[in-house]
Amino acid sequence: MQVVQLLPTISYGDAVGNDTLAIQDIIRQMGYETQIYAENIDGRLPARTAMPFLQFPDLSNEDVVIYHGSTGTELNFRLPQLGGRKIMIYHNITPPAFFHPYSPSAEQLTAFGLQGIENLRDTVDYCIADSEFNKANLREMGYPCPMDVCPVLIPFKDYERTPNKRILQQYTEDGYVNILFTGRVAPNKKQEDIIRAFFYYHTYYNKRSRLILVGSWNGMEKYYDRLCDYVNQLGLSDSVIFTGHIKFDEILAYYRLADVFLCMSEHEGFCVPLVEAMYFDVPIIAYRSTAIPDTLGGCGMLLESKHPKVVAAAIHQIISDNRFCQKLIEGQRQRLVAFAHESIKQRFVELLGSFLEKEGLG
């Protein structure tokens, strides 16, 4: 019996790729033969981490394919023709409307992705969503199959690596408040709302503050250019840093420097950076949308409004009230326990084992 995984693209260091690799280890530990197959394989990954989809095996009814649904791809339409019982892990797809003013190709890709996921609703035997929000999305699409929620497996050991010393030395000693957001530069992430709130904080509360926006804008150049124009119009060019795509040790350094993690995103299927902020004891302010309340689970400051005056006041409260800040951090530490690797691993083992048993395959 094989339990193989299939996904459109496996990338080095991204959340879906990390989840796929962690699940492969779990499947092997459960005693099943396994392999990862993908249409596109990041060249930075070790050789044979994944095999090309062209080499996907013929599966029998005694085998299982775990499919990661996350983007527009022909795999969404080819999966029904593949053999084996089918499990989908759903990571969500950003609504196309976010990309309309900025990237026709991204708009088309996400529309194609949602069409493809809907196409699978009568094909998949079982679904695992990585948030309640994603599970609700599948139900809205008419998925009739059993489904459960299991958060992504996050490689916390990676965060124990040494942070970039140059960045730590550059920004540690100047006494500035560092406000951080990590995530690709994309319209659904609403970096413009982060910048707007930072303008109010920087102008009315603390001139000795900077905003650090970590993430690549590859494919979103038009959106990035508009953000840069906005920063210049607000007179913030010396106080807002766009890092672009950076090395992992540099990301670690920015987390260690951060005084506040600020998320104004309007679409998240899970939002791993929130958990990363918990890990680094960075107090979180986030706008209530999509999967963000699920991931926070009652911790951090969850705002009903993203009015810049409201957000700026929230930042000021964290920075100026140490007792309040420590209370937030303690709540985040308690929430972080729910994402412990062993806990999520055991949850996945139970869900996969239960499915196999019900299908007579365990």
Image (cartoon, helix red, strand yellow):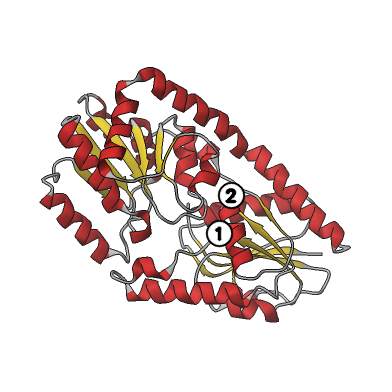
State left or right for residue 271 relative to residue 57: left
Marks 1/2: CA–CA distance: 9 Å
Which label number is shown at residue 152?
A: 2
Residue 352 point in image, percent of width and height: 76, 55
Q: Examine the rendered structure and indicate whether residue 148 appears above or below residue 158.
A: below
Quadrant including the N terminus: bottom right
Q: Examine the rendered structure and indicate whether residue 55 appears above or below residue 308.
A: below
Which label number is shown at residue 346?
A: none
Q: Which residue is mark 1?
A: 91
The answer to whether marks 1 and 2 mark residues whose Cβ atoms lie closer than 8 Å is yes
- Label 1: few (<14), some (14–19) or many (≥20) C-alpha neighbours in 10 Å: many
Who's the residue at 28% across and 70% down the image?
101
Amino acid on which disc 2 is placed: Val
State left or right for residue 351 relative to residue 309: right
Residue 291 point in image, percent of width and height: 51, 51
SS label for mark 2: loop
Nearer to me, 180 or 266 = 266
Task: State the residue lying farthest toward the right.
Answer: 360
- Label 2: few (<14), some (14–19) or many (≥20) C-alpha neighbours in 10 Å: many
SS label for mark 1: loop
State left or right for residue 299 relative to residue 152: left
Nearer to me, 151 or 30 = 151
